[in-house]
Image (tube, rainbow, N blue to C red):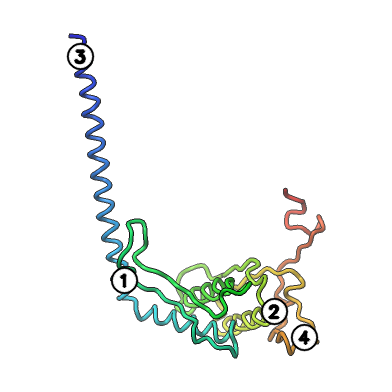
C-alpha cells in the first residue's frame, strides 16, 4: 500500500510536469506565430513606406554630397533597407545596409555612423516628429580628416539656420577643433564662430575636470 501511494505521488508529479511542459510548448507556439505575423507585417510595412524610404535615401546622398564628400564621387555610396526572404528564426526579416567610398580606410568607418545618424536625425527634424531634438556625437570625429569635420559641422550649421529647432552636441580635443589660419586652403574654414557655441571646457587638471576629481 505504501509503495502504491509512492507511485501515485510520483505519477502525480509526472502529470504536473507534463502539463507544465504542454503549457510551455503552447506558449512557444503562440510566440512563434506572433513573431511570424510581426515579420510579415514588417515586410508589408517596407512596401507601404517605400516613399519614406526613398526620402531617406535622398537625404543620405544629400548628407554625403554636402557634408562629408564635397566635390568627391559618391556614385558607389548608398543607404538601403531591403527584405530578407530566407532567414533563420532569430534573424530580422529586413537588412539595413550603408556603403560609402573608402569605407575600409582608417576613420572612414566612423563616417557611416555620422552619415546615418544625421540622416535619421534630420529626417525627424524635417518631419517635425515629436522626438528628442538633439543629437550627441562624443568623439565621433576622431581619426577623420579635418576638412571632412569642418564640412560636416558647416552643413549642420546651415540646417540649424533653416529649421532652428534642434541641438547638435559634439566633443573635441582642443587640437581636433582648432584650424590654423595658414591651413584654411587645405582644411577649409568654419562658416561661423564656433567659439561662441562652446558650452563647457575640461582638462586633466583636477579643478577643471567634470566631477572635480579623478575617478578610477
CB contact under 8 Å: marks 1 and 4: no
Q: Which circle's residue, 4 or 3, is located before the other in the chain? A: 3
Question: Which image quadrant is residue 67 in?
Answer: bottom right
Residue 192 appears left or right of 109: right
The kind of secondary structure element at disc 4 is helix
Give how far apart the Cα atoms at labels 1 and 4 are: 49 Å
Q: Badge 1, how many Cα within 10 Å: few under 14, some, many 20+?
A: few
Question: Which image quadrant is residue 38 in?
Answer: bottom left
Q: Badge 3, how many Cα within 10 Å: few under 14, some, many 20+?
A: few
Q: Which circle's residue, 1 or 4, is located before the other in the chain? A: 1
CB contact under 8 Å: marks 2 and 4: yes
- Nearer the observer: mark 2 or 1; the answer is 2
Measuring 23% from the left and 21% from the top, which residue is drawn there?
10
Q: Badge 2, how many Cα within 10 Å: few under 14, some, many 20+?
A: some
Q: Badge 4, how many Cα within 10 Å: few under 14, some, many 20+?
A: few
Residue 106 appears left or right of 79: right
Measuring 63% from the left and 66% from the top, which residue is drawn there?
138
Q: Which circle's residue, 2 or 1, is located before the other in the chain? A: 1
Q: Which circle's residue, 2 or 3, is located before the other in the chain? A: 3
- Location of mark 4 (residue): 183
Residue 32 appears left or right of 78: left
Can you give x and y, in whole percent of width and height, for residue 20 in the image?
26, 35
The kind of secondary structure element at disc 1 is helix
- Nearer the observer: mark 1 or 4; the answer is 4
Measuring 54% from the left and 73% from the top, which residue is drawn there?
112
**What number is the disc on residue 5?**
3
Q: Quadrant of the N terminus?
A: top left
Give how far apart the Cα atoms at labels 3 and 1 are: 59 Å
Give how far apart the Cα atoms at labels 4 and 3 are: 93 Å
Question: Which image quadrant is residue 177 in?
Answer: bottom right
Can you give x and y, in whole percent of width and height, for residue 30 in the image?
25, 50
**What number is the disc on residue 45?**
1
Amino acid at each position: 500500500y505504501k509503495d502504491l501511494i509512492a507511485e501515485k505521488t510520483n505519477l502525480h508529479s509526472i502529470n504536473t510536469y507534463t502539463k507544465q511542459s504542454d503549457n510551455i510548448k503552447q506558449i512557444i507556439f503562440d510566440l512563434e506565430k506572433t513573431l511570424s505575423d510581426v515579420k510579415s507585417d514588417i515586410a508589408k510595412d517596407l512596401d507601404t513606406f517605400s516613399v519614406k524610404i526613398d526620402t531617406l535615401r535622398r537625404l543620405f546622398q544629400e548628407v554625403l554630397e554636402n557634408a562629408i564628400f564635397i566635390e568627391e564621387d559618391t556614385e558607389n555610396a548608398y543607404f538601403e533597407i531591403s527584405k530578407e526572404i530566407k532567414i533563420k528564426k532569430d534573424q530580422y526579416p529586413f537588412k539595413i545596409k550603408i556603403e560609402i567610398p573608402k569605407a575600409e580606410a582608417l576613420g572612414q568607418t566612423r563616417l557611416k555612423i555620422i552619415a546615418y545618424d544625421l540622416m535619421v536625425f534630420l529626417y525627424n527634424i524635417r518631419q517635425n516628429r515629436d522626438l528628442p531634438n538633439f543629437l550627441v556625437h562624443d568623439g565621433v570625429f576622431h581619426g577623420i580628416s579635418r576638412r571632412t569635420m569642418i564640412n560636416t559641422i558647416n552643413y549642420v550649421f546651415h540646417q540649424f539656420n533653416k529649421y532652428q529647432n534642434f541641438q547638435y552636441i559634439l566633443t573635441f580635443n582642443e587640437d581636433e577643433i582648432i584650424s590654423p589660419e595658414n591651413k584654411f586652403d587645405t582644411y577649409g574654414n568654419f562658416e561661423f564662430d564656433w567659439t561662441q557655441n562652446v558650452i563647457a571646457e575640461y582638462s586633466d587638471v583636477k579643478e577643471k575636470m567634470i566631477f572635480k576629481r579623478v575617478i578610477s
